[in-house]
Amino acid sequence: MSAARHPADSLSGPAEDYLKAIYDLEQTRGAGAATNDIAQRLDIAAASVSGMIRRLAEHGLIEHEPYRGVRLTPQGRMAALRTIRRHRVIESYLATALGYPWDRVHDEAELLEHAASDELVDRMAAAIGEPATDPHGAPIPARDGSVTERPVIALEALGAGAVAVVARVGDEDAARLRYLAELGILPGARVEVVNRAPFDGPLTLRVDGDERTIGPALAAHVLVATPERSLLGG
Amino acid sequence: MSAARHPADSLSGPAEDYLKAIYDLEQTRGAGAATNDIAQRLDIAAASVSGMIRRLAEHGLIEHEPYRGVRLTPQGRMAALRTIRRHRVIESYLATALGYPWDRVHDEAELLEHAASDELVDRMAAAIGEPATDPHGAPIPARDGSVTERPVIALEALGAGAVAVVARVGDEDAARLRYLAELGILPGARVEVVNRAPFDGPLTLRVDGDERTIGPALAAHVLVATPERSLLGG
DNA sequence: CACAAGGTTTAGGGAAGCCTAAACTTTTCT
DNA sequence: AGAAAAGTTTAGGCTTCCCTAAACCTTGTG
């Protein structure tokens, strides 16, 4: 009959990775996270995920409905956000204070996030001026777990003539980040959709005065804020 | 019959801690490190140490003569020095770049040293000007594993009238570090032995114009360089 | 020299995390 | 509905790293 131990205990590295993955999946899909999706995201066999799910549920961090998926408890969500904060502060610090190139901060942060103390992370954040987002534009959760999400849409969803500002790009694939940087598609860049092929065809953009073409798959990983949406509010 | 695998593989955190401990014990005592000493240093049962010894020997990092102790192989010594470099660079960086108090850098570095990449450590070292020692005066091994040890003796070994410069203090005990800082006994401080009680009695020192008394047990953890020794060479 | 004390190793066990293979549930397709 | 496909869980194994208890060397002492 062991349940919900570890009051404010520290979690293992793997456990933190699971919680992060579940958090992300919950955000993307509306519902609970599926075993298979967690397995794919972490590159781990589905059977192993079942095992960890049992352990996390015993610790009160997730709720598990067999064959239906898992959801974070408030406690689990808090733990996930703490890890995400760590990750994004570290990414920002590596880029700003230590000159890491933006396509490499993710991997290094992935290693460090499980070892860094909250104090260290807070000192890092303070040293670089408490940034609101990481180098890829993802919001950095506050110490209390609150996250301010800007209203954004996928670049891929824009039509011809639209004007927008790049808010955020997916941070996991280093090669993709390098390519986007070459195109000038960085958070903060102003882009204008010059032409849009029908359905899910490529987009022609004007970025920084240059015309660039970008496929829909890549464009799906770029989130932008449009002036109208910003004014209308979310 | 598996032996000496893992050519340049990365070691587990625990394994790195064992190698560090063995390195230190080899330095202090002349001979090989005893199971019990390793166990005590890492706060682990002696039986557990036997288990890890077997694993490290299989990986070619140490040589084990049953019931006689262990010695590092050149490969193991290199691995230990890499970890020690990581530890001391991180300590220095935390103190210099992030304002950590010197009694707290050790514990934080202990956590980080197993997760930080060589690139990160090198960037940290570069960012603070490639220091030669950590905040407690311990030398930072170079990337190639070379260490420059200054000739030092224990403060406790000085007689009345001796003048010396504090070179290094033991870094493990935070309370001790705070106390030494209060006395002004920091690396670089000039101390003069005003009086010395016979045998292992306390020392009266002049530090920074103030008279301080320090017991022999504490003084054994303070290493100093004397002008004479420096001139004569080690 | 024998024996007690102390240090070391083996035996056996446990938790975390991973794996593959097999069993089981749910969904989907005909 | 019934069967195939897809997804999930259980079963059984493995490695790392820790533990306690018991067996085993080595040493120092009477």
Image (cartoon, coloured by chain):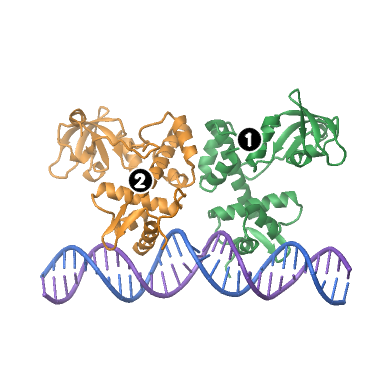
Chain colours: A orange, B green, C blue, D purple
Q: Amino acid at mark 2?
A: Glu
Q: Which residue is mark 2?
A: A172
Which residue is nearer to you in this view: B7 or A231?
A: A231
Question: How far from the left and from the top, in percent, is residue C25?
Answer: 24, 68
State which quarter of the image contains the C terminus of chain B: top right
Which residue is nearer to you in this view: B29 or B108?
A: B108
Is residue A171 visible in the rendered image? The answer is yes
Query: Residue B66 falls in which quadrant of the image?
Result: bottom right
Question: How far from the left and from the top, in percent, is residue B188?
Answer: 70, 30
Q: Amino acid at mark 1?
A: Pro
Total numbered labels: 2
Q: Residue B160: which disc?
A: none
Residue at image point 18% right, 40% down? A157
Is residue A99 visible in the rendered image? The answer is no
Secondary structure under the numbered disc 2 in the rendered image:
loop
Chain letter of disc 1 in the image: B
State which quarter of the image contains the N terminus of chain B: bottom right
Which residue is nearer to you in this view: A178 or B189?
A: B189
Question: Within 10 angstroms of label 1, few (less than 14), some, or many (20 or more) residues?
Answer: many
Up-down relation of residue A172 to residue A234 (above or below):
below
The Cα–Cα distance between marks 1 and 2, rounded to whole angstroms, is 36 Å
Residue at image point 65% right, 59% down? B62
Up-down relation of residue D12 to residue B93 (above or below):
below
Chain letter of disc 2 in the image: A
Q: Residue B135: which disc?
A: 1
Question: How far from the left and from the top, in percent, is residue A74?
Answer: 34, 47
